[in-house]
Amino acid sequence: MTGVWQYVVLLPFMCVATMTDARRQTIPNWLTYPGIVVGLVLNAVLGAGRASAELPVTQATFEGLMHGFWGFLTCGALMVVCLVFFGVGGGDVKLLAMTGAFLGLDHGLEAMLWTFVVAAVIGLGILIWQLGVVDLVRRSLRRGMEVLRLGRQMPMAEEDRAVLGQELFLALAALLAVGIQMWTRVLT
């Protein structure tokens, strides 16, 4: 049920979120809350546009609204789990819930998964840039050998913890993920 229009309207929201995240390390409520509403309304309007003789306008509108609502609810709930257990920011939760409101359940979850893949690639790139490939492999092997030798996980050394404790901006990864999805929709 997700078409290109949802992506076209979502992308400006994602661009602003990426800029504010990069400048202020925050994704503002004044962006995400209206974005959630716009995503839900857009799905309702596009759902109404799909009305036919078999599907009345009210039912098509409701189905469109529910399409966005389930995406919002599911993506938001999964990001709340990430907030509690993995320390992502509250703005990231609202940003990906907004993405779900625009894209619906299936495409919203796909966007969220792409976001995590892109963030992992960016994070690995940052580690390689800071440490170099040789040092990164050496540290990883040393850590792996410690775990094998002791048979359990040991606390991480302070120097390793400092390297891994850097902020990762999910707004950029989410923007790239939505761009990847939109590109694949346009090509198919």
Image (cartoon, helix red, strand yellow):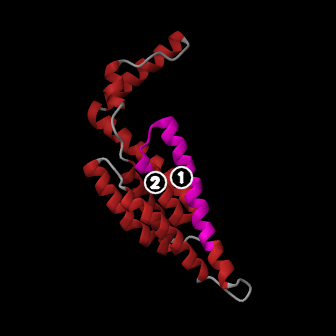
Q: Separation of disc 2 and disc 1 at Cα?
A: 7 Å
**Is residue 54 inside the magenta stretch?**
no
Q: Nearer the viewer, residue 104 or 45?
A: 45
Q: Which percent across, then down, holds residue 51?
A: 65, 84
Residue range of the region highlighted in magenta in the rendering: 64-92
- Residue 110: which quarter of the image? bottom right
Is 101 on the left or on the right of 165, as rendered? right
Q: Of 170 and 65, which appears nearest the observer?
A: 65
> Which residue type carries mark 1?
Gly
**Which residue is the site of mark 2?**
94
Would residue 3 be visible to someone looking at this image?
no
x 51%, y 10%: residue:
149
Identify the residue at horizontal 36%, vertical 67% (top origin). Answer: 12
Q: Residue at x 34, y 62 (%)?
A: 15
Badge 1: how crowded within 10 Å, few (<14), some, or many (20+)?
A: many
**Whether residue 103 is situated above or below residue 137 in the rendered picture:** below
- The residue at the far right in this view is 54
* Residue 87 falls inside the magenta stretch: yes
Taking 43 as reference, is 178 above or below it? above
Residue assigned mark 1: 76
Residue type at mark 2: give it: Lys
Q: Secondary structure at mark 1?
A: helix
The residue located at (47%, 15%) in the rendering is 154
